[in-house]
Image: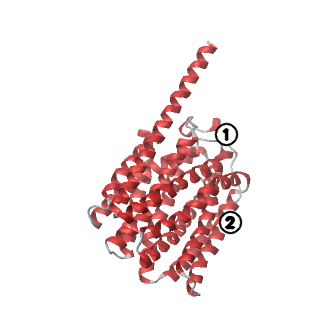
């Protein structure tokens, strides 16, 4: 893998950082103004709905047009949309409608970014290096998401919203420059049959893989909505504490990246994905029960197991279809996951508003356990049915 292709990693990190600074900074503004989980929930729903609706269609676009140009276009339009928030605040535009509108616009762009970025990776990275690159790429995305609270929380507390959101617009522009420097040269197309055995398609069906991939989106999005309500709204801590907690989560993801390849070789990607999600959901129940120090430890461990599960799921999904259909596969998975996110966010918001965040975390955990279990059973049944068909064909041929 060339040094230019490695530029995709910081570009992904910066894009993820920018998207989530915008979202979490906006959530903190709403918590300060209203203190309601439902208000924050509606913000996350406003972000999830356009992606859920548009991702499958945008996935097909990612398979038809130049993926590198699509990524750059997403970053540039995101920079303009992000800059609209501090400009609107400076002009005295009503805060709540402005927050919803700018985040809605960024969500539409993200619906194109997810399949385009996945398809570009499959297009440029040799198959033998996919597992390693996916580990680094997923960690870049998740660390950007988690560290956004560290950067955003501290900046919001000490500098205010306008400098924070202006900086955020700059992150998207930097990402566009990095992707442009990757260049336009492509590697030869590899069919599924040409993949190395370690990354060759294993016959896993797309639908349950999309369910597992969506499981990760649900957990991250709803967790990020519950966390500021827990720390700022209920425990009355400052945004900087929120930033520290998420920075600890980022460290957990880095540890996950360090051990993923060994874990995948020992357990396999499928077991790692299902088992990691199940362990993570158990930890979710404990996180809001014992105060900030215990929360940090549980977030560290949770991010460690979740990170490995997330990387394994990305690798499985990326190699489940031919290279020419990777954008469509990730578009479907992203739309599927975000549709579930809207439903789970509504349920968790209503439960939290009528009780407290302990029950919101427990609700998220229960739904996640069901999703991971359904995906595992679904895959096992399809594998069993496929094996039976192969045996019948062999007998007929004999």
Q: Residue at point 60% right, 44% down?
A: 127
Q: Quadrant of the C terminus?
A: top right
Q: Which residue occupies the foreground of this view, 362 or 396?
A: 362
Q: Residue at point 61% right, 19% down?
A: 393
Using the rendered image of the protein, determine whether residue 363 is visible from the camera's viewpoint: yes
Which circle's residue, 1 or 2, is located before the other in the chain? 2
Q: Which residue is mark 1?
A: 191
- Corner quadrant of residue 11: bottom right
Query: Circle 1: is it few (<14), some (14-19), or many (20+) Cα within 10 Å?
Result: few
Cα separation, mark 1 vs mark 2, equals 28 Å
- Corner quadrant of residue 248: bottom left
Q: Which residue is mark 2?
A: 73
Residue 357 pos. (x, y %):
35, 63
In the image, residue 153 sits, relative to residue 44, either above or below, namely below
Q: Which residue occupies the foreground of this view, 376 or 53?
A: 53
Q: Residue furthest left?
A: 290
Using the rendered image of the protein, determine whether residue 259 is visible from the camera's viewpoint: no
Query: Circle 2: is it few (<14), some (14-19), or many (20+) Cα within 10 Å?
Result: some
Disc 2 secondary structure class: helix
Residue 97 pos. (x, y %):
56, 76
Q: Residue at point 62% right, 56% down?
A: 53
In the image, residue 304 sits, relative to residue 161, either above or below, namely above
Q: Which residue occupies the foreground of this view, 316 or 374?
A: 374
């Amino acid at each position: 893998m060339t040094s230019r292709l490695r530029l995709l990693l910081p570009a992904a990190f910066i894009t993820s950082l920018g998207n989530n600074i915008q979202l979490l900074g906006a959530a903190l503004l709403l918590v300060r103004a209203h203190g309601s989980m439902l208000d924050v929930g509606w913000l996350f729903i406003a972000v999830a709905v356009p992606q859920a609706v548009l991702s499958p269609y945008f996935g097909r676009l990612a398979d038809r047009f130049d993926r590198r140009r699509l990524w750059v276009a997403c970053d540039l339009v995101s920079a303009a949309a992000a800059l609209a928030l501090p400009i609107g605040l400076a002009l005295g535009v009503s805060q709540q409608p402005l927050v919803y509108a700018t985040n809605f616009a960024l969500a539409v762009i993200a619906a194109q970014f997810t399949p385009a970025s996945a398809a570009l990776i499959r297009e440029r990275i040799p198959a033998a290096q996919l597992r390693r690159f996916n580990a680094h790429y997923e960690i870049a995305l998740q660390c950007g998401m988690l560290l956004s609270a560290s950067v955003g929380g501290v900046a919001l507390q000490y500098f205010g919203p306008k400098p924070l959101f202006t900086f955020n617009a700059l992150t998207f522009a930097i990402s566009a420059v990095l992707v442009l420097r990757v260049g336009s040269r492509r590697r030869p197309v590899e069919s599924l049959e040409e993949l190395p055995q370690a990354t060759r398609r294993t016959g896993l069906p797309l639908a349950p893989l999309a369910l597992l991939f969506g499981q990760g989106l649900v957990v991250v999005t709803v967790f990020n909505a519950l966390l500021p309500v827990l720390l700022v709204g209920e425990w009355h801590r400052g945004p900087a504490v929120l930033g520290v907690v998420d920075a600890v989560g980022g460290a957990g993801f880095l540890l996950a990246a360090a051990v993923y390849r060994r874990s995948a070789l020992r357990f396999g990607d499928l077991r790692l994905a299902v088992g990691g999600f199940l362990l993570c959901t158990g930890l979710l129940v404990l996180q809001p029960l014992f105060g900030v120090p215990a929360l940090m430890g549980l977030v560290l461990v949770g991010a460690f197991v979740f990170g490995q599960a997330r990387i394994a799921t990305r690798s499985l999904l990326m190699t489940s279809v031919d290279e020419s259909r990777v954008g469509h596969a990730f578009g479907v998975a992203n739309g599927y996951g975000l549709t579930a996110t809207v439903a789970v966010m509504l349920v968790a918001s209503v439960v939290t508003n009528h009780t407290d965040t302990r029950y919101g975390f427990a609700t998220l955990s229960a739904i996640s356990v069901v999703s991971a279990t359904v995906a595992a059973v679904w895959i096992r049944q399809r594998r069993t049915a496929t094996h039976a068909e192969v045996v019948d064909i062999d007998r007929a041929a004999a």
